[in-house]
Image (spheres, rainbow, N blue to C red):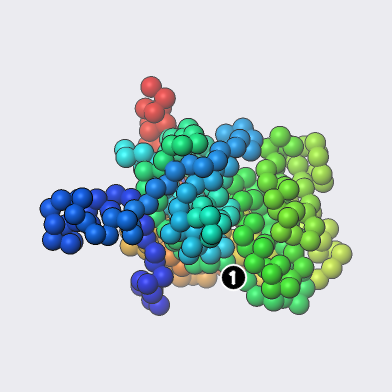
Amino acid sequence: MDHFDWDDAFIVRSEAEHQLHYCHGSSKESENPSRGRYHQDFTILEKRELCANTYYFKVNAPLLAKKIQAGQFIIIRPNLDSERIPLSIAGWDREKGYLELVIMAAGRTSTEATMKNVGDSIQDVVGPLGQRSHVAKYEGACVVLGGGYGTGAVIPTARDLRQLGNKVYGIVGARTKDLLILVDELKAVCDEVFVTTNDGSVGIQGFVTHALEKIMEREKVSMVLAVGPVPMMMAVAKVTEGKGIEAWVSLNAIMVDGTGMCGACRVTVGGKTRFACYHGPDFNAYQVDFGELVKRQQMFVAQEKIAFEAMQR
Ligand SMILES: Cc1cc2nc3c(=O)[nH]c(=O)nc-3n(C[C@H](O)[C@H](O)[C@H](O)COP(=O)(O)OP(=O)(O)OC[C@H]3O[C@@H](n4cnc5c(N)ncnc54)[C@H](O)[C@@H]3O)c2cc1C
Ligand code: FES
């Protein structure tokens, strides 16, 4: 683990709290003096449906909200018997102590998460994980592109880029207008936002790359960040490569521990093995072996199907 600063890995699990009394030499949980300090209650404070199968959640998490940075992520376990799933952070309030999440029901565990309602709790949450997004003051414009839940993930980075004095464009794409999410929230942190739909039901007809090309024709672009499905991130890399543009993509590899120890999220970037959870999730778009990423994402399709069907029974 090169350059890993464990002080920066602020790991919070509600279940860990139940073990703390052993560390303090007491066999009774009630005698644990750290209970107040470490107690975490991940209650859902707000829930909104953004589009079919995709929900916005505001979750109480004061310690995490104090420390999280744009581009980092968390891993949640919705219920005691759930698997753990990585989720990006769409926002936070350090004073009020909450995180904002966008969760798309993709399979068993994400569906379990989206079934939670206001007042329910998430069993446990680990984070902040991964590295913060790369931000700097650029000569030309910055463009953030979001597809699906990725639109939530680019909002904090867009805000950081703008605070550094950059001109920031946002692009949100979806198959059709009913699937577009968080357009107003992205507008609040960008100079201008373009919307694209494959069917042309609203905005520019086509893919997010069509809007990106329009911006590139109009002015100098220095940096892009794309978060969304792999084909979208690959297309962004193709459109920008060789044009002097710094391009970042957030890799949604399958993850288990999220701290760089299990190797589940192994990706190849610039010919080197990297762990998306620790070295990323953002990587140089031109150096990612997307083919390998897609192959590894599909490794457990059969088991995922069985798990989803078992949940529905
Ligand atoms: C760093 C990171 C940030 C993420 N942020 C968000 C987020 O903010 N909101 C959100 O809804 N989802 C996010 N994801 C994806 C989310 O973690 C997966 O959808 C989830 O793990 C699927 O678990 P499941 O049990 O519901 O479905 P599974 O049964 O495991 O899989 C169902 C389907 O989802 C696909 N899938 C499985 N794991 C992933 C994955 N890691 N990424 C993409 N597709 C996957 C499978 O190939 C399958 O098609 C993120 C993933 C990563 C790695
Ligand atoms: S999830 Fe285990 S090394 Fe990244």
Spot the residue most to the top.
Answer: 313
- The x, y position of residue 47, in whole percent, is 56, 38
Q: Is residue 260 left or right of residue 164?
A: left
Residue 263 visible? The answer is no
Task: Check the image and report above or below for 278 versus 118.
Answer: below
Q: Nearer the viewer, residue 53 or 260?
A: 53
Q: Is residue 214 left or right of residue 51?
A: right
Residue 22 visible? The answer is yes
Task: Check the image and report above or below for 143 versus 17.
Answer: below
Name the residue at 51% across, 42% down. Answer: 45
Q: Secondary structure at mark 1?
A: loop
The residue tagged 1 is 134
Name the residue at 47% across, 49% down. Answer: 60
Spot the residue most to the right.
Answer: 218
- The x, y position of residue 197, in whole percent, is 75, 42
- The x, y position of residue 98, in whole percent, is 51, 52
Q: Nearer the viewer, residue 128 or 303?
A: 128
Name the residue at 80% across, 57% down. Answer: 192
Q: Nearer the viewer, residue 41 or 263?
A: 41
